[in-house]
């Protein structure tokens, strides 16, 4: 048997795809032309080699496959004769544009779709910062160039000690969280942290409260694990534990976003926070505090985390670097009480083993070097400009009521009850504005009508243009 080999010198010279890697084995003796013809034909029919692709020169392919050029020329001639390829004088041989693919009638091979750019106003988009990205690239390259031993063996399911210590120091200073490295788990985002908690500490059929309206992905994490959810209305002071106890007395947990409620944007008052902590202590229940965008506060110091007020160990604290840096980093964290930590680590070790040590190492250096703090200062200035441009674009629009947010990365626009927000979402999309309907985030109570609009990740000019286009569309519709 003659196996595939590759001639790097020829590959570099021709700068063409190495088809020899796709042709599995050619017979050492016998009809090599037939074998090569059949192998290339299968690749073309399966769509592995797409229509219009250029075949390598016959001399180069023969050298790579260690066969005679005569055999390759004969195979190419058969492909042309059978309609699988076309020969162009002076250019070479190409895969035909109209080759029928195997199984194309039942299972068409769709072209690879490019990721659509999100419309201005879309939630969950981070703002790129070139200075931060340049520094992060340097840090990653440094760890790749001089990798340390922890990159070459399986690590701690909690995450690397260096990053956990760095996160703990950051949270103690910036958020007033009571923690050390031993109580932190590095996750692939807030959603994983929430899912690990629910699967570890609750069982199907257990009841839990959730803010109403709520963060839809949090609702999915609970309901996807068989938890009975009760929406508790959010007012100007946040979620009311007395109201929750009346609606579902035996709840085992509550999910809240107290620093900046999603999607209404209100902050839970101190009396409500203390009352909720007391409810959890008295009922042996858990509070899941999602502190998703606490770093982005535009007036006054950041609000202290609820976890820092809890002396009974009933609060699970979740945070993420997705909003701060970029979602593609996929690093978040959970601060867990002792009882929760043991079960979460056991589950994490079975399902995800341990986080990426390479990304952890670079992020640790980024934080310790003061680069994250500098990034946040720049990001807040950018977010303030983006927020103000969004408000300016919407200002004066008929039927819309706005409150300037002092924290976070989204704006809530409330509507007259006679206007359906789902209809306005479609109007907005038709003019290039990616808003979300507030009514879709309702849980148990009658849905409120409003638009939830993100201003992170987009230039002030793009946000103003999109918002102004919606305002003009609303005037034409006389809403």
Image (tube, grey):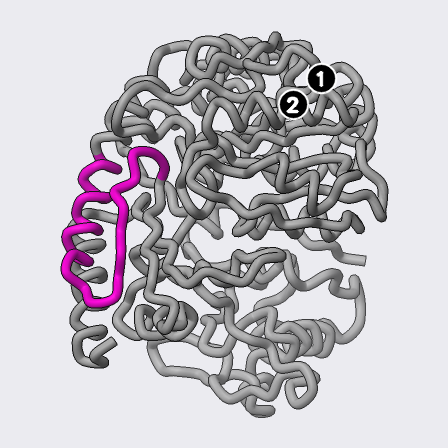
Q: Which mark is residue 315?
A: 2
Residue 426, compared with residue 238, is above or below; it is: below
Q: Is residue 297 left or right of residue 467?
A: right
- Please state the horizontal and vertical placement of residue 334, each as a whole percent of the image: 62, 25
Residue 185 visible here: no
SS at badge 2 = strand
Q: Left or right: 298 with respect to 59?
A: left
Q: Does dot 1 land on a helix, a strand or a loop?
A: loop
The percent position of residue 343, horizontal first and vertical second, equals 82, 25
Q: Quadrant of the N terminus?
A: bottom right
Q: Give me the disc on residue 337.
A: 1
Image coordinates for residue 376, horizontal then vertical, percent: 31, 25
What is the distance, in whole Å, between disc 2 and disc 1 at their CAs? 7 Å
Q: Give left or right: position of 204 versus 363.
A: right
Q: Tell me which residue sits at (54%, 12%) in the image.
A: 168
> For the point 53% across and 14% down, which residue is it?
177
Q: Is residue 224 visible?
A: yes
Residue count near mark 2 (Cα–Cα under 10 Å), binned few <14, some 14–19, many ≥20: many
In depth, the one of 146 and 222 nearer the eye is 222
- Where does the C terminus fall, quadrant-wise? bottom left
Residue pictured at 60% horizontal, 69% vertical: 48
The mark total stands at 2
Image: magenta residue range: 382-408
2 or 1: tag closer to the N-terminus: 2
397 in magenta: yes
Cβ atoms at labels 2 and 1 below 8 Å apart = yes
Q: Residues within 10 Å of mark 1 (few under 14, many from 20)?
A: some
């Amino acid at each position: 048997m003659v196996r595939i080999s590759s001639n790097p010198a020829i590959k570099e010279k021709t700068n063409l795809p190495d088809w020899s890697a796709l042709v599995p084995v050619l017979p050492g003796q016998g009809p090599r032309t037939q074998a090569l013809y059949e192998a290339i034909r299968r690749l073309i029919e399966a769509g592995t080699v797409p229509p219009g692709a250029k075949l390598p020169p016959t001399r180069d392919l023969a050298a790579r496959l260690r066969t005679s050029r005569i055999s390759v020329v004969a195979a190419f001639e058969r492909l042309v004769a059978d309609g699988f390829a076309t020969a162009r004088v002076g250019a070479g041989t190409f895969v035909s544009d109209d080759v029928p693919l195997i199984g194309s009638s039942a299972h068409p091979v769709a072209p690879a779709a490019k990721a659509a750019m999100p419309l201005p106003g879309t939630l969950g988009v981070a703002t790129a910062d070139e200075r931060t990205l340049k520094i992060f690239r340097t840090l990653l390259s440094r760890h790749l160039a001089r990798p340390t031993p922890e990159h070459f063996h399986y690590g701690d399911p909690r995450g690397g000690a260096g990053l956990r210590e760095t996160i703990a120091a950051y949270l103690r200073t910036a958020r007033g969280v009571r923690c050390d490295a031993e109580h932190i788990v590095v996750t692939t985002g807030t959603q994983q942290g929430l899912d690990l908690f629910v699967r570890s500490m609750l069982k199907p059929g257990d009841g839990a409260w959730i803010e109403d309206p709520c963060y839809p992905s949090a609702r999915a994490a609970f309901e996807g694990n068989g938890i009975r959810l009760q929406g508790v209305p959010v007012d100007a002071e946040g979620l009311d534990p007395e109201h929750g106890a009346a609606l579902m007395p035996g709840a085992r947990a509550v999910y809240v976003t107290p620093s900046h409620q999603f999607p209404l944007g209100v902050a839970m008052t101190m009396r409500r926070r203390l009352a909720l902590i007391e409810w959890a202590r008295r009922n042996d229940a858990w509070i899941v505090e999602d502190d998703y965008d606490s770093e982005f506060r535009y007036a006054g110091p950041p609000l202290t985390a609820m976890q820092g007020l809890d002396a009974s160990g009933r609060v699970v604290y979740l945070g993420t670097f997705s909003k701060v840096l970029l979602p593609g980093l996929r690093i978040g964290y959970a601060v867990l009480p002792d009882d929760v930590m043991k079960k979460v680590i056991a589950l994490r070790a079975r399902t995800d083993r341990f986080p990426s040590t390479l990304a952890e190492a670079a992020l640790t250096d980024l934080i310790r070097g003061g680069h994250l703090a500098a990034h946040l200062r720049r990001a807040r200035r950018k977010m303030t400009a983006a927020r103000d441009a969004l408000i300016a674009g919407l200002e004066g629009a008929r039927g819309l009521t706005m409150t300037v947010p002092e924290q976070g990365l989204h704006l809530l626009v409330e509507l007259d009850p006679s206007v359906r927000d789902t209809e306005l979402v479609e109007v907005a999309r038709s003019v290039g504005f990616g808003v979300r309907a507030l009514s879709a985030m309702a849980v148990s109570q009658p849905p409120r009508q409003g638009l939830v609009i993100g201003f992170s990740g987009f230039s002030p000019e793009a946000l103003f243009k999109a918002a102004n286009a919606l305002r003009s569309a609303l005037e034409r519709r006389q809403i």
